[in-house]
Image: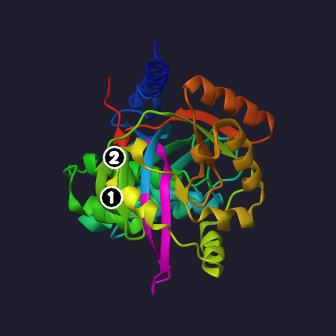
């Protein structure tokens, strides 16, 4: 077997394992009517930040690629009465719980979120601040959904927060996909896409997945590229990087995007043709110097041209020659005290898993 064939075979095994894990029955887990969705992580093959706009955002030309690594979102909707919604919200408030929030055009949507973090990170996020709730609220308003209902979400997190891997955005995209199906909306309903674009730069990408070039602030899909299945290792120090702080640091000393990078992006039809580039990385490394150590550690093992910070970080990824190499690198990086996972580039998108 050639090296390329072996690499592809190992990548397929990884994807099949993820698919098998995703086939566990949502109904058995949450009850009748529940659905299960996958919410993949992403990396930026290219992040070319441009000028700061009058609205405070930055123009960005980016190429994103989905990963096989994914969160799992369970979703169930139950009809409810006004009394049931009010009582559940009041009970949560009285108990000091923040896992419930009210949304919808007439406060008709009670959303409860059970967040199960499998990344080893401590801490939680209130339901009202979770992008998954905000996605449900905005879609309900966009389609005028005024029926009283209880939306139950369980989100199993395998994608770490503040990593530049798009975990929260992907969860939000999965909720949009799940609710659209439950409410009888077409997969290409423009209201779903518009909600995604207003939620953040990454959310719209996850509706499509695979590999894509985007611009605007990163939310406008320009074109799809042929995706890859190459093995990848993700390495993240314990600390995160604030995206807002990274952009503020970038504005202090902006780094121009070389013309050859922009030309290479435009000429690429396949993910493997895209040169790795991120002109926000220096700003993130200035805020979290440990990122420089992670980059140097990976570059020593796979070559600097195969290593890049994803987004504003704090996850750095390295392209590996095989899944076994990615696994070995993850084991070694974990021994250094960093969070690390082997995975592959993937054609995944936020999607509902077919029932068995």
**Which residue sits furthest bottom?**
54
Let me know if residue 60 is in the magenta part.
yes
At 62% from the left and 26% from the top, the residue drawn is 325
Residue 282 appears anywhere in the view: yes
The picture quadrant where one finds residue 321 is top right
Let me know if residue 107 is in the magenta part.
no
Question: For the magenta stretch, what is the residue range?
Answer: 39-62
Query: x, y percentage for residue 76?
Result: 38, 43
Above or below for 251 versus 119: below
Q: Read off the residue under disc 2.
A: 178
At 53% from the left and 57% from the top, the residue drawn is 277
Label 2 neighbour load within 10 Å: few <14, some 14-19, many 20+ = many
Above or below for 69 versus 150: above
Quadrant location, the C terminus:
top left
Query: x, y percentage for residue 301?
Result: 69, 36
* Label 1: element kind: loop
Query: x, y percentage for residue 163?
Result: 61, 53
Out of 77 and 240, give the one closest to the viewer. Answer: 240
């Amino acid at each position: 077997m050639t090296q390329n064939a072996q690499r592809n075979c190992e990548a397929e095994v990884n994807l099949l394992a993820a698919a098998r894990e995703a086939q566990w029955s949502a109904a058995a887990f949450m009850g009748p009517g529940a659905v299960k969705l996958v919410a993949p992580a992403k990396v930026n093959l290219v992040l070319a930040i441009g000028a700061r706009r009058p609205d405070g955002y930055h123009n960005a030309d980016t190429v994103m690629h989905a990963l096989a690594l994914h969160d799992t979102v369970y979703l169930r909707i139950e009809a409810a009465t006004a009394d049931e919604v009010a009582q559940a919200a009041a009970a949560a408030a009285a108990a000091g719980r923040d896992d419930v929030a009210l949304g919808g055009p007439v406060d008709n949507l009670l959303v409860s979120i059970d967040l199960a973090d499998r990344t080893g990170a401590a801490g939680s996020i209130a339901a009202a601040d979770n992008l998954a709730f905000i996605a449900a609220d905005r879609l309900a308003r966009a389609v005028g959904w005024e029926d009283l209902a209880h939306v139950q979400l369980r989100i199993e997190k395998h994608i770490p927060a503040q990593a530049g891997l798009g975990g929260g955005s992907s969860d939000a995209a999965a909720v949009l996909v799940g609710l659209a199906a439950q409410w009888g909306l077409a997969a290409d309903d423009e209201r779903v896409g518009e909600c995604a674009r207003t939620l953040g730069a990454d959310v719209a990408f996850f509706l499509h997945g695979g590999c894509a070039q985007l611009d605007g602030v990163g939310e406008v899909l320009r074109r799809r590229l042929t995706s890859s299945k190459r093995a990848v290792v993700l390495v993240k120090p314990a600390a995160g990087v604030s995206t807002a702080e990274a952009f503020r640091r970038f504005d202090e000393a902006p780094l121009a995007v070389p013309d050859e990078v922009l030309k290479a992006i435009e000429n690429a039809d396949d993910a493997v043709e895209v040169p790795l580039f991120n002109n926000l990385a220096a700003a993130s490394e200035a805020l979290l110097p440990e990122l420089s150590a992670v980059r140097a550690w990976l570059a020593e093992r796979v070559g600097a041209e195969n290593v890049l910070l994803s987004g504003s970080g704090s996850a750095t990824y390295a392209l590996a020659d095989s899944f076994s190499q990615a696994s070995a690198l993850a084991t070694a990086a974990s021994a250094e005290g960093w969070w690390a996972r082997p995975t592959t580039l993937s054609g995944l998108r936020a999607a509902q898993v077919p029932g068995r």
